[in-house]
Structure formats: C-alpha cells, structure tokens
Image: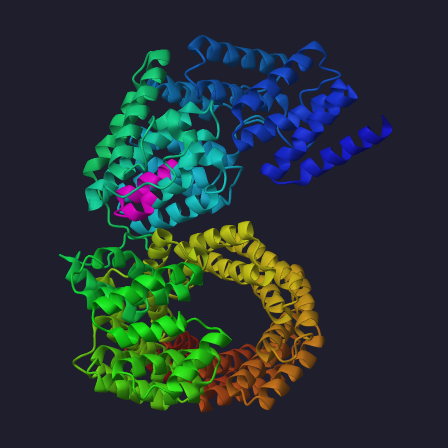
Amino acid sequence: MARPKKRFQQLIEEIDRTPWGPAEQALVSEAVALAVEIGDEQLEYEARMRQTASANMNGATDVMLNSFAWCLARHDADPQRFPADLDYGGADLMWQFKWMASALRSSPAFSVEQIAAVLDDMETHYRTAGLGLSGVLTARFEDAWDAGRFEDAESLRVRLEATPRDEHSHCDACGRSQFAGFFAETDRDADAIRLVEEMLEGGFSCGEEPEHALSRVLLPYLRAGRFDEAKSAHLRSYRLAKDNPDNLRIVANNIVFAAVTGNEARALALVERHLAWLAHDGLNVDAHFAALAAFAFALDRVADAGHGDTPVRGAESPALAPFFGAHDGSWTASDLAAAAWATAERIGADFDDRDGTEGHARSLARIRALAGERYEVPIRSDAFLTTADAATPADADAWFDRAMDLAQFGAEHETLQALPHALAVEDPAKRAQLMSMRLGILIALDRAEEAAELLPARIDALRAAGKHEQADLEQRLGLATFGLNTPEAAAALEHELRSSDALPAWSRGDLAISRASLHMHADEPDAALDLAERAARAFAEAEDSRLVNTTTLVAIAAVLQKGDTEAASALLDRLLAQDDLSVGHRAQALQTRARVRGGGEAFTEGAADADEACRLLAGLGATKALASAHLLAGALWEDAGDPEKAVTRYRVTSRLVAQEGGDATGADFRLARAMLAAGDAEEAAELFGRVLEREEQSEVSAASRGMTVSLLARALASSGEFGQAVGAFGYAAELFGEAEEHADHAVALTERAKILARFDEHDDAIESLEAATEIARKAPDAVGALVDVLHNLGQAYGARQDERAFALFDEVSALAREHEAGWLLADVTDSRARAFAEFGRTDEAVAAALTAADGFAALGDAGSAGGSELFAARLLAGGDRAADAVPIYRSAIEHAEAHPPLRQVSALELGDVLEALGRHVEAAEVRALLES
C-alpha cells in the first residue's frame, strides 16, 4: 500500500494549494475514492473533511451534508483518532457545523425540528469542546432571520454583538456582510452601508466577500441617492461573483439592481447568462427562490420597456423544466416572467408552511414593491437594438426592389431571404434577374452544384422574357457568367469575348464584367479595369444604368487594388454625386469611401460615411451586413479619437452579432476597448472578463489572450482594483512569454511593477522590472517597450540609491537622441535629477532638473517644465540656498499658468521662502497670486 498512500499525500498537498473550483473538486473526489480503496478511515477522514469544505464553497449541498455526517460520526466515536481540527488551513469540524444548519434551512424538505436538532447538537458539541458560543449564536441568528422571525433575529444579533469573538466567529468580512444584509432587509439602510464601507476600508475579504456584501447594499445606495457608489458596487460585485454557481443569490441581487436602474437589456443578458445555475444545486431551494423572484422582476421590467416578446435564450433547456414547466418552443420574456413568479410563489409558500411564518411572502412583497421604483444609473455594456426596423415590402414587386438593393450592396444572406418573396413577380424579365442573383450568390458561397441545378430554370426565364441571345450565351457558358472561378470558365469567357461583336450590348457587358471579376480574383487589376470600362460602355448602350453603376464599383475596386487611392476617391465622389444611384449601390459606395478615408487618416469623414451606410442598410433590413457596417463605423470613430461614438456603434455590432451569429468575441473585445478609452473602466473590466472566458474556452492563441488580459488589467487598475490588476498583468506576462512576444511580455511586467511600487512593494517591483529588462532586450526593434522598461528600472534603482540607475538613464537618453524623441530626453533628464537628489548630489540634481525644464519648455510642455523647476527650487530651498531658489520658483509659477494646482503649490512655497528671507512685501505679493 506504500504507493497508493504516497499518491494520497500528493493529492492532499495539491488540494490544499488549489483554488476552489472544478479542478479542486476533482482532486478531492479522487482523494476520497483512493482512501476508500486503501481502506484507511483516518485517511478518508482527512479527505472528507476537505470534501465538506469544497462542497460548501462550490454549491454541492448534498455532498456537503453526507460528508459532514460521516466525519461527525467518526469524531464522536473516537475524538483522538478523528480530531475536530486537522490543522490544514481549512475549516474544522466545529466550524463546518455552521454550514449544516444553513444547508438544512435552505430546503423546505427539512423540517423545523431537524434544523433545531442540528442547532442544539452544534451547541452541545461547542460546550463539550469548551468553545465560545459566538459561532452557535451566529447560526441561530441566521436561522431566525431566514425563517422571517425578525424579533428573534434582532435579539440574537444584539446578543451576538455583545459576545466575545473567538476562532469560530464569522470573520470580519462575513460578519459585517451578514449584519449589513439584515439591516438592509429591516430598512436600516445607513447602518447597512456603514458596515460594508467599514469592510472595504479595512480590506476585509473572504470566500464570497466582498461581492456578497456589495450586492446587499445596492438598493440602499440607490435609495440614498449615491448612484456612483451603487454602480461601482454592482460592477465589482457581479465581476467577482459571476463564475461560481454557488453565488446565485449574489447574482440575483445584481439582476434586480440592473432592472431597477433602467438597464433592462443588461438585466435580460444576466438572466440568460445565469438561468442554468438554477439546476446546479438541487438542495439550495432558498437560493432558487431568490433567483426566480429576481428573474421574474427583471423580465417584467424588460416587458415594460417594450421587449416582452424578446426570446429568452437558454430558458427552453430541459434541465429548467422543473422550474418553469413544459413549453413549446422559445420562452418570451413576458411568458417566462409569469412562470418564474408562479414558481417563486410556490417555493415561498412551502418555506412559510414549514416555518409557520410569512417570511418568504414578505420577501416577494418587497421585490414586487420595487415595481414603483426607478433610478437612472446607465450601464452601457448591454443594450436593446435601436436601429430602425425596415418596412416590410407590400407586394412581390416591392420585394423585387428590396432584393435588388440588397444584392447591389452585396448582402448575400439577406438577398437569399428576400428572393422567395420577390420571385412571385409576374414580369418574366424580373424573374430572370432574380434567378441571376441567386446563381451568383450560390457560386460566391461555394454551392456550385446547387447553382448548376438551377441554371436551366434561369435559361427558361430568359427565353420567356424574350432574351434568346443571352439564353443561348448562358447555355454555352454554363456558370461562367455567374462568377465560377475555374480555368475553363475563364477560357470560355475569353473565347466568347473575342467573337462578341454580334451580341446585344447587354450581353457584351455581361461577358466583360464577368471576366473582369475573375481578373480581380487573380490580382490582375489592370486587366480588370480595362474590361470594366468596356462593360460600362456596353451597359450604357443598353441603357441599363443599374449595371453601369455596378461596373463603376468594380472599376473602383480595381483602382484600389492597384493602390491608387486618390483616383479611387475621385471616382467614389463622382458616383455618390449621381441622382440615379440605388440605395444598395449608395451604401456600398459609402462603405468603400469610408475605408478609403480611414486609410488616408481622414477618420472623422470616413466615420460619417460609415454611419450613413448603416442608416441605409437598416432601412433595407440587412442585419448581417449592418453588424459589419457598425463595426467599421466604430473602428473609424475609435481612430478619430472619439471613443464615446465608437462605444455606441460597437454596442449595436455586439447585439447584432449575438442575434445573427458571428464573431461575438471580437465585437465585445472592441466594445470593451472603446469603453476603457471612454473612461468606463469598470464596465470594460467586466466585458474583457467575458471575452477572456470565451477565448479560453475556444483555446485561442496565447498572444491573443495575453492582449485581452493586458487590457483587462488596465481596466482593473483604472477601477481601483489594484490587487486584481497585479494578478492580471502577471497572467498577461505569462501568456506573452508563452507566445514569445517579448515586447508585450516586458510591458506587462513593467505595468505590474508600477502598481507594486505604488503600494511600496519595491523589492517585488524591482524584481519584475529586472526580468522585464532582460526580456525587452530580446526585442531591440520595439524601442518604445525597451525605453519604458529601462526608464522605470532606472527610477526604481535611483530611489534605492543604486548606482546602476545612471547607466540605464544614459541608455535611455541615447535612444531618445537616436530617435529624436525630445520629450523623452527631457523626461529621463528629470528622472536623473531625482536620482542625483537621492544620492545627496544637490548641485548635479538642480542642474539636471533645470536642463529637463528647458527641454520641456522648448517642446511647449509648460506644465512639465514647471514641475522640474519646482523640484529644483525645493532642493535649493531645503539646502540653505533659499535666495537661489527664488528665481526658479518664479519661473515655475510662470510655467504653471495653465496648471492651477502646480501654480498654487509653487506660490505657497515661494511665499514661505520669501518670508523666511525677510522679504515680506514680496511674500505678500506672491501669496496674492493664490486669490487671483
């Protein structure tokens, strides 16, 4: 048995260092099974004690109850062999008692008598073990509160506060969170907020804290009018809770918040994301009750916002049938709301019958009463589509026009959807055109066999329209005129072109444009352009302005393929100035010009074109094409430096992609990036987290994930979540290292070091920067990354009076001169000055600071110049050279004209220096500046 026992110890060690979650659960299960196989009850006790804790943290109530019962029986039978505390860093048996009463209370299947027996058994064990009763009182308080016996709960809360804390008391985070929740439910909002803010200020945290506490004060914050704190608490709480199904209550609180703050689209998205959690833990019925009530309330708000017919994705899952009943097809928001209310009421009645109270009925009444409350706290990560709905064509001829416009834009998917409606037209010429579009689209979609089957019908339609020459031509060519890209098709078109003079003008144009398209595919733009011009003349002769415009767009594409953007722009301008341009052609031309303008860095003009294309496509109902058009518009507004406009465009893209299918991950990445740039860091962090989750599930490249994590880290840092940001930058560095992206790897380590230094973790910061320096040198072409790393490490060395700082500053200065980076040269000179000061080399420090100030001033950066001068003046004033400091202070004040905080500090200090020099009149004059 030596080898199995060794494996068991390895498992125990691995369990104790693995975070809660599926991986840890699997290890625990393996350890229990191995102990049973070995037949050693002491080893099994070790494993099952961990299993109880694991099941509690992961929401496996049935496993937790069974595991605890097994362990308690062994302990009671032989406390020496099976001690209550295994001293492994997790919960001991007496602590786990608190979970048992809570678990029984969470299901109406357990009676009041069973719960009371567990509480009494717990108190007996505590007294026998000589333990304090804080843990017992906590469990009894929770029982009274959950049952709706509020007077008993308040009495127990008062006793609990007066009882000395001990090692089985709730931790600081959990205790404050619990009382905050009780205060919020008993209308003591200020007390609830106070406790949670104490927790946050003290940095207290635990397994589900602070996310649970934050969710408990969302409504109190709103009622207090503290909307910014409420929004921040919601985003942080949800971000921390969203990955663990055992956090169903926390998510429910956040869903209610979204619904009551005018964020109905977000509420719906959260409901869809977490519906499946109802089936996670069959015994945690009280959490089901809370979640169902929250879902129902949120879906009612969705209906009130005019979206009651919206399908709720995922609700049709068979696993959810026990909660909502059988249903034919998708659930709408309105129907699911009614089903959720009904189930919540049934569950609540079961609890109240068991408890002999109206506790759950009161809970439902409280949430229903929120229907009369609304607070405007906009969150922009989710939204309903606000694009104008396209009017449904009235008849087959109107559908023909719609199909033509869609085809002329190139919206293949929507054209295929429109064709069946349009084919009912009586005009055989129109039917022939529609069949031509269908064949072209099928070829473009690589469905040539299907196209070949339809070709005879197209030829018959041509003959019915009296176009016998064209029918004969297509009979000879097969699918060549519909875009079939084969050597045989190209040769056939060439043959027909050589003998086409006798054909009607329209047919000559058709041959020319078909061959031009194949030249485009072969990257032969000159040949394509010649044939496009030939086709345009032929279509003009045939008086078909529609195909003349189509041919012009092909010609523009050929000119762009040649790289002549100036000529293409001129052609696009002329085309868009025409009055006979169809909606589809205009949208295509606008989108093309938007891209051309973006390539020429005329981002605002390009974005305006893309926006107009979006408007036209919305009118055509081209939803798939509309997603791409909004994506283009968002990218151009982002490049134009207007992230607010980019956010609105990307948000539509994201919703359309979710509705129509497509690259949801890419769309949400862009949306999150724009949100971060627009200052919505907390919302961006949540969205980046969702993107990362999808990327990891899809096993995208390490480099791509590294970029996502890096931006997530920046969003977390901007949100004040510095601890998580440090971890995220570390993870980004690992991913970039795996991908051998040296520059990005070094930058991630540098950003991590900056945060560590901010919180005085200087040793770790320097270690991170030293590693970053070695990595950055592997990518010498990435000068920006190398400079940033070297500069930061030099500053860190300088602060530690490490002479290595100056060699690094020299290297950065040399790179700045080589690349003519004047501002960087001034900045590193300022850093050199501050390092000199740390070494007590005042004269050199002052000289370097003034040199830096001159450099900044020469570049027009007066604020930075004033900052360097203020540093130099302080050095002189603090070194008994106050008179020498005066003119430098005055220069700093002058440079700080547009920087009030710098001007104020400089004037205050100069006034003090002049006063100390006995120059009282001058001191008064300087201080007067503070009032101007």
Query: Left of 83 or right of it: where is 502?
Result: left
Residue 456 appearing in the image? yes
Percent across and percent down for residue 481 are: 37, 74
Task: Name the residue located 43 percent from the left edge and 71 percent from the top edge.
Answer: 484
Write down the quadrant of residue 346 in the picture: top left
- Which residue occupies the foreground of this view, 654 or 727? 654
Q: Is residue 765 above or below residue 134?
A: below
Q: Is residue 194 visible?
A: no
How far across and how far down the image is residue 717, in percent? Answer: 49, 59
Residue 621 inside the magenta-drawn segment? no
| Direction left: furthest residue | 394
For residue 264: magenta? Answer: yes
Q: Which residue corresponds to the image point at 27% horizontal and 86% vertical from the top-left?
A: 538
Image quarter of residue 38: top right
Q: Is residue 574 above or below residue 381?
A: below
- Residue placed most toward the observer, 541 or 648: 541
Q: Residue furthest right?
A: 2
Instruction: Determine the main secondary structure of the stretch shown in magenta.
Output: helix
Q: Position of residue 221 (x, y in %)?
A: 31, 43
Image coordinates of residue 672 in percent, x first then y, are: 41, 60
Q: Quadrant of residue 680?
A: bottom left
Stretch in magenta = 252-268
Count the marks: 0
Decide if residue 719 is on the left or right side of residue 581: right
Question: Where is the N terminus found, in terms of image quarters?
Answer: top right
Comparing 631 with 180, the one in front is 631
Residue 212 placement, left or right of 706 = left
User: Relative to residue 346, is residue 594 depicted above or below?
Assistant: below
What colour-coding does the image apply? rainbow
Q: Residue at x 21, y 45 (%)?
A: 305
